[in-house]
């Protein structure tokens, strides 16, 4: 049977393609697939780029660290496997400029360093940074700005390190693996590994850290990692993608969730477009199926012909769509080349399969039920055109569609919260639409008498095609709602990002401020025009027990728990709760709490250690044991770049311990040079330049924002095509009615006004419903999913109603223009 | 059933449900049509002509009674079974032609042969197109053909399978008098040459009189039967 069905399916399809009738169907599917695969490619590539960026912290994909020189055979093995390998040796040494000296963190690297990320340099201390082309040549040294300031050196100076002398040729601004924590306080210097023996710094007993860096094809890196984990000695430590800083992680989490949400919208629009396409396909093929049956075709044969045609359309759309999606994504990536630092990994082909499988799933869910119905068209229709196929069982009509949508939503988001939010929002919206459909009929009946003939015709059309109107209302409403929702969430998201990263965000951290120099130091900062944030004391402490149990024996469900339990960490005390801290459990310290053994923990510590209020934590502070009960849990907004601590104590307890102070401040780029004076005046204060870290965070956010905008454009395009498809679905009927009206004496203008009245009403009503839906869903998504504050947006209502009316009117007018322009006789003759 | 009977209806009744209750649109019709015969079914609008045609051709099922077509009981067959029988034994010509707009004239004529799985579909269709005078129009699509030409395509499509029975429903209804006359001549000529049984539904008395027998329906009942001299 298929042998006979294929030629017929192909022949009629080719002819329909030429006649242009399928163009809107194909366009809808193609744009939907393009949106889906475009998003897929982009998300996959940016996701991989983010992973790569995380690797920049290691300056490699894989890093081996050891207190002893690293065996050459590791490097030889890596090179044999086609991986890039460099080595980096680190030690603490004093650098001299004449009599001035400064302790520094010396890094000697081999050519090719860094394998991931970039070394940023400048020609003057604290100057604007640019990427370095390579590493220092032998005999050259690249010190950090604050080192030069401390020893009064500049570019061109000669510095002594151990037994060797070096010429300063560049200023080191950052290197990728310098660490995002404050543990490494001595300023860095970078030299060529070839110069290391001449310094004679490495002697028996010297504290030296050796590292081998590897990078290359991901799969090969994984295989090499497996090999290396067996080959390495116990004292050698293997590191891959490290824990990113909390700020970057927050940004990436939000971006990832949002992109999933946006691609989900494209999936839903695709489903709506296919449902409409299938509906129109059924309407257009009722006669031909009846004829085929009259001529002797079986039901299975007609079903096979339709299925083959739709599969073919789906396949063509998937191929063209995937190509377009790929091209759009490639174009976007090319436009962002500078921002993306050329580090974006090549695309893999997984999104093509995702697109293809999704279109098949959607076709099965949305196109199969109408096709089954089509195949039941009775042959009698050749004699009586009013005879159509029997209506589908409700379960068969909507069951597969609902199943496909739920499956796709869950498959795309892979997150139960977002899944539930979306499904709930959608269900509520559909219920609202059913109510609106009922309202529409009421409205039509009441308004018919009071308006002019054009409006009466237009509104009567809505009421008469009640089922069709509700279907279109659903399509328009859903389309506008998701676009509005996307805009709401996108605006809130970006606003929140902007709020959390204002232009005067602190760009320098200052630690190790001696308590007696604190006031003078902060005054000095203010004199330099810096905006200083709060100053907090800082001491080192180690958690040793929880509720009387030693933490060394404890096991933690959360892997971060072990880190919090064993690590020396910085703690502080204060009675003021920062605006970037929010109490989620318990109460913040009151005046009565001053001097009491209490502690406020951040949500990270609470979750990692599984703490509840009242738990007794035992700390070792400078050799003394100190017990405090958990009084509150704080949610800390780490991306405020204010001094923040996991553990905060009330004042009146720890003041006696030897601690220092820390603060952060914003320096205008032009006044940053005064930092050199600061380093001279307060030599013990360590300055930590956050500019580069901030640039890194900003670049991640920019990438996410650009991806979001491009996804938004895809979705907008998909939405418009869906709207056109919806208008197109009723076009044949309209053509006939228009001809009838004009035959009865209506002029072109009246018919046009009637059509516009109908679409405007439909659009305004859809826009109204969409605004309601988007506001409710937006609130839910913003608060529960993205965890950003939600403010009601009046523009949602204005854009929803006015935009909906305009958009549907214009789209409707464009699609039905030919209806009015065609001479009535042509239509009535069946032309 | 006589040995040369090709189509037989026994007490055919068709009822439909209407808002006012059950409505009988065909009542207790029995008839017997022999091979090679040409029979016209006439009557006013709503007399039940098209309903009778639909039942005789197996396009619809009767509420009671049965139809025997080429020896097969249509009422005992399911939809696919009736379709198979139509493919093998029945041809149709409709008032509104019912051509597949996306297929050329030749492809429309090939369609029933292809559905029956005939390997020589193209050759047979080309031959039939020549017979109906469409030899130079085979590559045209229905929209590019005049009404008369479209009906010729429909006639070619009906005869190409050499059916036992040809049903024609107001075949000239959409054509002007001259073209209609030509089409009718062609229909009767082909009918005579291929010994096909013709069942013609029409309200045109003139046309009906060219058949060998006239059945007149009124109010869903067989009013009278006239053998044309």
Image (cartoon, grey):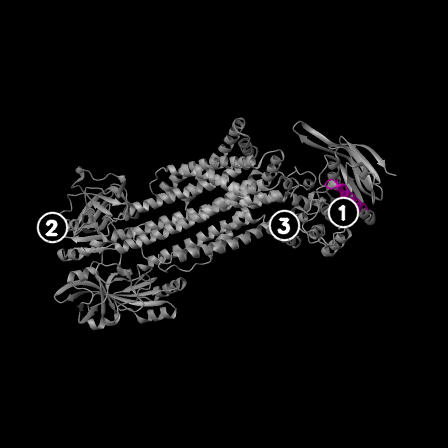
Q: Residues within 10 Å of mark 3 (few under 14, many from 20)?
A: many
Q: Horizontally, is A776 left or right of A560 in the view?
A: right
Q: Are marks 1 and 2 in contact (CB under 8 Å)?
A: no
Residue A144 visible from this viewpoint: yes
Q: Position of residue A407 (x, y in %)?
A: 48, 46
Quadrant into which the N terminus of chain B falls: top right
| Pointers 3 and 2 in contact (C-beta within 8 Å) | no
> In this rendering, do the residues under marks 1 and 3 share a single chain?
no
Q: Are marks 1 and 3 in contact (CB under 8 Å)?
A: no
Mark 1–mark 3 distance (CA, rounded to whole Å) = 23 Å
Q: Position of residue B104 (x, y in %)?
A: 68, 51
Q: Is residue B182 magenta?
A: yes
Question: Magenta region: which residues?
Answer: B167-188
Chain designation of label 1: B
Can residue A52 be found in the magenta stretch?
A: no
Compared across the picture, whether B144 is left or right of A697 comes to: right
Can you tell which mark lies on residue A305? 3
Sequence-first tag of 3 and 2: 3
- Which residue is at the front of the view, A699 or A812? A812
Q: Dot 2: what SS?
A: helix
> CA separation, marks 1 and 2?
111 Å
Residue A516, numbered circle: 2
What element does badge 1 sit on?
Answer: helix
Q: Which residue is mark 1?
A: B89
**Residue A402 visible at all:** no
Q: Residues within 10 Å of mark 2 (few under 14, many from 20)?
A: few
């Amino acid at each position: 049977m298929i042998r006979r069905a294929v030629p017929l399916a192909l022949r009629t399809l080719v002819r329909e393609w030429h006649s242009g009738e399928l163009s809107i169907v194909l366009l809808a599917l193609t744009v939907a697939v393009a949106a889906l695969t475009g998003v897929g490619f982009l998300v996959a590539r940016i996701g991989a780029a983010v992973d790569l960026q995380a690797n920049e912290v290691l300056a490699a994909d894989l890093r081996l660290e050891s207190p002893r020189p690293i065996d050459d055979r590791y490097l030889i093995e890596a090179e044999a496997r086609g991986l890039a390998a460099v080595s980096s040796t680190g030690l603490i040494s004093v650098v001299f400029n004449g009599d001035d000296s400064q302790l520094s963190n010396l890094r000697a690297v081999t050519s090719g360093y860094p394998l991931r990320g970039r070394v940023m340099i400048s020609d003057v201390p604290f100057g604007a940074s640019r990427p370095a082309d390579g590493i220092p040549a032998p005999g050259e040294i690249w010190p950090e700005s604050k080192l030069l300031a401390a020893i009064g050196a500049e570019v061109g100076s000669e510095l002594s390190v151990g037994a060797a002398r070096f010429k300063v040729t560049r200023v080191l601004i950052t290197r990728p693996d310098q660490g995002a924590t404050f543990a490494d306080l001595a300023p860095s210097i970078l030299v060529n590994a070839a110069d290391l023996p001449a310094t004679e710094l490495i002697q028996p007993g010297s504290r030296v850290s050796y590292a081998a860096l590897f990078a290359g094809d991901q799969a090969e890196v994984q295989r090499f990692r497996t090999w290396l984990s067996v080959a390495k000695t116990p004292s050698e430590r293997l590191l891959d993608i490290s824990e990113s800083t909390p700020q970057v992680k927050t940004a990436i989490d939000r971006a990832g969730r949002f992109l999933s949400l946006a691609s989900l919208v494209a999936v839903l629009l695709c489903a709506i477009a296919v449902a409409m396409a299938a509906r129109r396909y059924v309407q257009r093929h009722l006669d031909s199926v009846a004829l085929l049956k009259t001529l002797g075709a079986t039901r299975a044969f007609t079903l096979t012909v339709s299925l083959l045609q739709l599969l073919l359309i789906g396949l063509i759309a998937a191929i063209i769509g995937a190509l377009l999606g790929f091209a759009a994504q490639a174009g976007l990536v090319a436009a962002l080349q500078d921002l993306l630092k050329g580090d974006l990994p090549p695309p893999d082909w997984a999104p093509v399969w995702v697109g293809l499988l999704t279109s098949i799933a959607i076709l099965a869910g949305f196109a199969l039920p109408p096709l089954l119905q089509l195949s039941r068209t009775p042959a009698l229709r050749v004699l009586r055109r009013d005879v159509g196929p029997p209506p589908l069982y409700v379960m068969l009509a909507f069951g597969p569609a609902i199943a496909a949508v739920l499956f796709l939503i869950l498959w795309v988001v892979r997150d139960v919260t977002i899944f539930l939010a979306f499904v709930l929002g959608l269900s509520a919206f559909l219920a609202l639409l059913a109510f609106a459909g009922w309202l529409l009929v009421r409205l039509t009946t009441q308004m018919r008498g009071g308006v002019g003939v054009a409006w009466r015709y237009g509104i009567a059309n809505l009421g008469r095609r009640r089922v069709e109107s509700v279907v279109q209302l659903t399509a328009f409403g859903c389309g506008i709602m998701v676009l509005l929702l996307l805009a709401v969430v996108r605006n809130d998201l970006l606003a929140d990002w902007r709020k959390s990263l204002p232009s005067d965000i602190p760009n320098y951290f200052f630690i190790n401020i001696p308590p007696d120099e604190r006031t003078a130091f902060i005054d000095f900062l203010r004199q330099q025009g810096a905006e200083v944030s709060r100053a907090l004391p800082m001491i080192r402490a180690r958690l040793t027990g929880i509720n009387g149990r030693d933490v060394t024996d404890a096991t933690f469900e959360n892997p971060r728990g072990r880190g919090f339990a064993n690590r020396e960490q910085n703690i502080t005390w204060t009675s003021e709760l920062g605006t970037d801290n929010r109490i989620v459990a318990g109460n913040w310290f009151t005046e009565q709490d001053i001097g009491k053994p209490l502690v406020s923990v951040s949500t990270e510590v609470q979750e990692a250690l599984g703490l509840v209020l009242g738990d007794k934590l035992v700390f070792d502070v400078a050799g003394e044991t100190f017990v405090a009960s958990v009084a509150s849990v704080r949610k800390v907004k780490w991306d405020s770049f204010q001094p923040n601590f996991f553990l905060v104590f009330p004042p009146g307890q720890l003041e006696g311990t030897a601690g220092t102070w820390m603060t952060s401040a914003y320096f205008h780029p032009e006044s940053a040079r005064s930092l050199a004076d600061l380093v001279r005046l307060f030599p013990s204060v360590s300055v930590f330049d956050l500019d580069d870290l901030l640039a890194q965070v900003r670049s991640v956010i920019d990438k996410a924002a650009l991806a979001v905008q491009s996804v938004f454009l895809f979705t907008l395009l998909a939405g418009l095509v869906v709207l056109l498809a919806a208008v197109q679905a009723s076009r044949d009927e309209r053509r006939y009615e228009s001809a009838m009206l004009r035959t009865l004496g209506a002029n072109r203008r009246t018919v046009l006004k009637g059509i516009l009245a109908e679409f405007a009403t439909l659009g305004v009503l859809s826009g109204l419903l969409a605004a309601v839906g988007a506001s409710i869903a937006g609130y839910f998504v913003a608060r529960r999913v993205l965890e950003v504050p939600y403010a009601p947006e009046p523009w949602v209502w204005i854009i929803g109603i006015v935009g909906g009316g305009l958009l549907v009117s214009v789209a409707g007018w464009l699609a039905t223009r030919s209806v009015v322009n065609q001479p009535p006789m042509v239509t009535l003759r069946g032309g | 059933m006589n040995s040369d009977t090709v189509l037989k209806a026994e007490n055919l009744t068709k009822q439909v449900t209407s808002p006012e209750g059950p409505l009988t649109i065909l009542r207790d019709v029995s008839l017997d049509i022999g091979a090679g015969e040409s029979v016209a079914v006439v009557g006013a609008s709503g007399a039940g002509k098209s309903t009778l045609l639909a039942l005789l051709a197996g396009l619809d099922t009767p509420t009671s009674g049965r139809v025997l077509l080429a020896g097969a009981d249509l009422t005992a067959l399911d939809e696919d079974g009736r379709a198979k029988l139509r493919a093998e034994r029945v041809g149709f010509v409709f008032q509104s032609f019912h051509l597949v707009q996306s297929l050329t004239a030749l492809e429309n004529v090939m369609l029933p042969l292809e559905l029956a799985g005939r390997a020589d579909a193209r050759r047979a269709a080309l031959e039939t197109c020549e017979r109906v005078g469409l030899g130079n129009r085979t590559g045209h699509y229905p929209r590019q053909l005049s009404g008369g030409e479209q009906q010729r395509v429909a006639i070619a499509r009906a005869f190409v399978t050499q059916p036992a029975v040809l049903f024609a429903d107001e075949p000239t209804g959409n054509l002007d008098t001259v073209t209609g006359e030509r089409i009718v001549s062609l229909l009767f000529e082909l009918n005579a040459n291929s010994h096909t049984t013709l069942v013609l539904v029409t309200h045109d008395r003139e046309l009906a009189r060219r058949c060998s027998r006239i059945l007149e329906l009124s109010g869903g009942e067989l009013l009278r039967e006239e053998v044309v001299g």
